[in-house]
Image (spheres, rainbow, N blue to C red):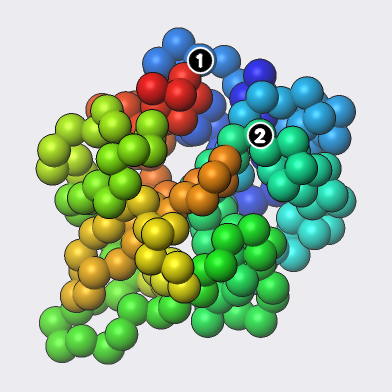
Amino acid sequence: MIAIIDYDIGNINAIANMLLRIGVRSNITAREDDIEKAEKIILPGNGSFDACMKNLRNSGLIPVLEEKALKQKVPVLGVCVGAQMLGNGSEEGVENGLGWLNIDVLRFPEIPGLRVPHMGWNEVSNRDLQNPMCASMEPKSRFYFVHSYYMAPRNPSDILLTAHYGIDFAAGVARGNIAGVQFHPEKSHRFGKQLLSAFVKGE
C-alpha cells in the first residue's frame, strides 16, 4: 500500500488521482497504523516551508515516518515543499527540516529578467541513470514547477535531476530509499505519470 501523508496542507487528491491513472491505488492518511503498513510513502507539500513543517510536527506523525524511512528503509518520495522538508531547513523560514538528507533550501538569486517564483514547465535532465526513477525517463522530459526556493544538496551525489532557471539547480534529489522532486509530477501529464510509475513500481 502507498501512503500519501495528510497533514492538512491543502488539496492532495491530485497525487492519488494521478496514481489511479497508472493503475495504482493509494491511501491518503493521517493515521499511524496506515503508515506502519505502508510499503511506500509520498510526502506532499504546498505553501510555505515553515507552515508545512509546523503542521507535520503538530500531526504527531514524524516518529512513525522516521521509523519507516530511516529504520525500515521504506521508499519515500517528497513532492515540492515535501522534498525541501527532507533537508536541513530553508531560507524561507526558521523551522528545522526533517534532516533526512543533507540539503539546504535557498531562494533564487536576484537576476535581471528572472521572475520569482519559477512557475511553469521546464525541462529536466537526469544525473543518476542508475536510479530506477531516472532509468525510464524520456529525453527532454518536462515537468511543472511552482517555487521560489530551490534545493541545494551539500553532497553532489545526492542530485538526481537538474533543471535551469537563471542557475542550474537540483530538480530531484535521492539518497538510498529517500527521494524528493521539486516539481509537481501530478501536474506534469505523461512525464509525471512516468516518474510516479517508476517510483511506485520500482521501474
Which residue lies under the disc numbered 1?
24
Q: Which amino acid does label 1 sit on?
A: Val
Name the quadrant of the C terminus.
top left
Q: Name the residue under label 2.
A: 74
> Does residue 72 appear anywhere in the picture?
yes
User: Is residue 176 depicted above or below 202 in this figure?
Assistant: below
Q: How crowded is mark 1: few (under 14 residues within 10 Å), some or many (20 or more)?
A: some
Foreground mark, 1 or 2, reads 2
Say which amino acid is labelled 2.
Val
Q: Residues within 10 Å of mark 2 (few under 14, many from 20)?
A: some
Mark 1 to mark 2 CA distance (whole Å): 17 Å
Which badge, 1 or 2, comes first in the chain's sequence?
A: 1
Secondary structure at badge 1 equals loop
Q: Nearer the viewer, residue 42 or 71?
A: 71
Q: Position of residue 65 (x, y in %)?
A: 75, 44
In-front residue for pair 183/76: 76
Residue that appears at 30% across and 85% down = 109
Picture quadrant where residue 113 is located: bottom left
